[in-house]
Amino acid sequence: MDVTLTPYRNNCISIRFSSSPLVIDAIRKTPGRLWNEDHKLWYIPNTQVNIDSLLQNLYETKLFHTLDESESTPDIAIPPSIKVEIGIKTTPSFEIKPKVPQKPVPCAKNAQAATKLLHQKYKEAILSRHYSPRTLQAYSAWLNKFLTFNKGVIPIILPEKEINSFISHLAVVEKISASTQNQALAAILFLYRFVIGQSVGSLNDVIRAKKPLHLPIVMSRDEVRTVLSKMSGDKWLIASLLYGTGIRLMECMELRVQDIDFARNEVTVRNGKGAKDRTTMLPEALKIPLRNHLATVRTIHDHDIAEGWGTVLMPHSLDKKYPNGANEWLWQWIFPQEKRWLNQTTGHQGRHHLDPSLVQRAVHEAVLKSNLTKRASCHTFRHSFATHLLENGHDIRTIQELLGHADLKTTMIYTHVLNRGPSGVRSPMDGL
């Protein structure tokens, strides 16, 4: 019994073999397999996932044998009865060459295992490019929806049609926003480019959601003062920092002790949006409240250390470079959570930063108590920060640097306050 894999048209692999129900059943279990009625042969897309799955299914038929590893070199694993010709696309992790047996790689045994393997490779591709955990979460969710839309099959042959249908479905049926649709398209293109290793052609047939131009919601100075007066404790301090520095909520949550420079009146934002560091000002009005807050946090940290804990998660595996850094005061969160987290496996305890949802809830309640007629949120403080700086006459470039915008066009949205809009025009009614 010989099975021969050879390059086929449209970046596929043909499978030629002597008639055998077991081999046919193994091929049918392979994701993406197709039958060519004219040539009377089976073929699969030339991707690593399909090759791994096909070989595993063939091994499980027990029609093929492998040399015992104890009697051969570690490289020998693929049975000589499976012939592979040069030209089949493979990755370095599973390179197939003619007459040179290779060590096998764990393969998918069924459709569920193939989907799990695809998700694993997708996650590895994202993490290897240092994308944020939120990007990984969003992209993985879109991959699930794409698989569901295509009934668990990843289109390989001319996938543009299926991609167009999926993206258009999101806009027409689910009526998602333009930015969400663009995110879904980016997640699918990432799959084809970096996981499957296949370029995607024209997507001109995509029905795109119209991207509206929204002006940011901005609170007046009196409204900011009123909302802050309805808050207290560390939630008040966080909201005040959002307005006084212009940083984002998660950037504030991830501030560490060393990021505050009282001498230079600076706050350093590390690994912000776009994996960029930047500095912004530290308001004089917040220096004393922030010092008092840090004194309380220091007491909590010293108490944790005394009980044998007091460690914090280090960024980018710096705990390997600085083994004692996780216990040091300068690495601690400025806004730690109230209770220590517990690792159920090791029993280790530590503190993470405050959950942002707690701050969002506190701001929402303060807005309700203030009887504001605006849909204000934590991010509204950032919009108000930029708008009020423009009103005070500060140049747009400086505000761009403080906000961390890569493109000046993003910052230009706040210039609507300079034009005053309808409020800058005197109605003729007032001249009667």
Image (spheres, rainbow, N blue to C red):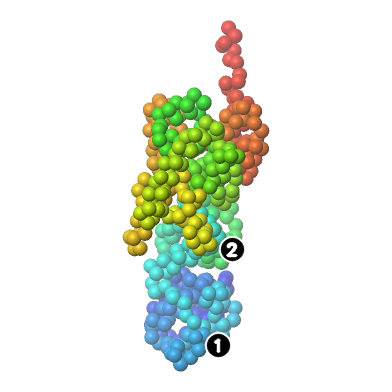
Q: Quadrant of residue 338?
A: top left
Q: Nearer the viewer, residue 144 or 342?
A: 342
Question: Which residue, given by chain and number where applicable, does mark 2 sit on?
Answer: 199
The amino acid type of the residue labelled 1 equals Lys
- From the top left corner, tell me how far across and down residue 137 is, in percent: 45, 54
Q: Is mark 2 on a helix, strand or loop?
A: loop
Is disc 1 surrounded by few (<14), some (14 to 19) or many (20+) residues within 10 Å?
A: few
- From the top left corner, tell me how far across and down residue 302 is, in percent: 41, 49
Mark 2 touches mark 1? (CB < 8 Å): no
Q: Residue at x 53, y 66 (%)?
A: 196
- Residue 432 visible to the viewer: yes
Identify the mark at residue 99; answer none if there is no mark.
Answer: 1
The amino acid type of the residue labelled 2 equals Ser
- From the top left corner, tell me how far across and down residue 4 is, in percent: 51, 84
Is disc 2 surrounded by few (<14), some (14 to 19) or many (20+) residues within 10 Å?
A: few
- From the top left corner, tell me how far across and down residue 202 is, in percent: 60, 57
